[in-house]
Amino acid sequence: MPDALTFEARLARAKFRAWHRGTREADYMIGGYFDRFHSEWDETALRWFEELLDEDDVDVMAWAMKTAAVPARFDDAMMRRMQQLDYVDIPR
């Protein structure tokens, strides 16, 4: 991540990337997670999320749904929050 970007610019970029994953399911899961929790994030949390965004959606969704083992680098409180899936709001 270039040092030239401010925290706010990185958040904006993360939001775009979270909501433009390529599938509606991934958008709702990853974008919904961003929308629900980003206001609480510090540098460490934002870096975690930026690294998560670099992963394949199929993997992220499997980790969140607990159908695949979470890699150690993502296995923490932020992933446990993601695994609750209570932030996903699918419009009808």
Image (tube, helix red, strand yellow):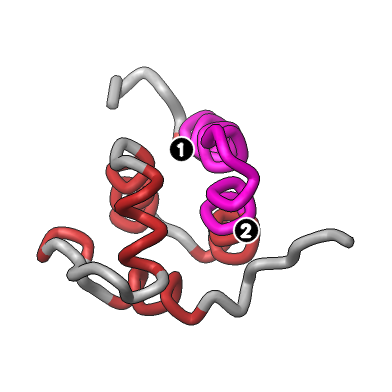
Whether residue 26 appears in magenta in the rendering, the answer is yes
In the image, residue 33 above or below residue 14: below
Q: Residue at x 36, y 18 (%)?
A: 4
| Type of the residue with mark 1 | Phe
Q: Residue furthest right?
A: 92
Residue 28 sits in quarter: bottom right
Q: Position of residue 46 (x, y in %)?
A: 38, 49
For badge 2, the amino acid type reads Gly
- Asked if labels 2 and 1 touch by Cβ distance under 8 angstroms, the answer is no
The numbered dot on residue 65 is none
Label 2 sits on a secondary structure element that is helix
Q: How many marks?
A: 2
Quadrant in which residue 51 is drawn: top left
Determine whether the residue tagged by mark 1 lies in a helix, strand or loop. Answer: helix
Per the rendered image, the range of residues in magenta is 9-31
Q: Which residue is mark 1?
A: 7
Image-based side of 89 in relation to 71, left or right: right
Q: Main secondary structure of the magenta part?
A: helix
Q: Residue at x 63, y 72 (%)?
A: 87
Residue 10 in the image: state x and y as whole percent: 47, 33
Q: Label 2: which residue?
A: 32
Mark toward the start of the polypeptide (1 vs 2): 1
Question: CA gap, disc 1 to disc 2?
Answer: 20 Å
Which residue is rendered at x = 59% and y = 33% of the image? 20
Residue furthest left in the image: 72
Residue 14 within the magenta-colored segment of the rendering: yes
Q: List x then y, in percent, for residue 54.
A: 31, 36
Q: Position of residue 15 (x, y in %)?
A: 58, 40
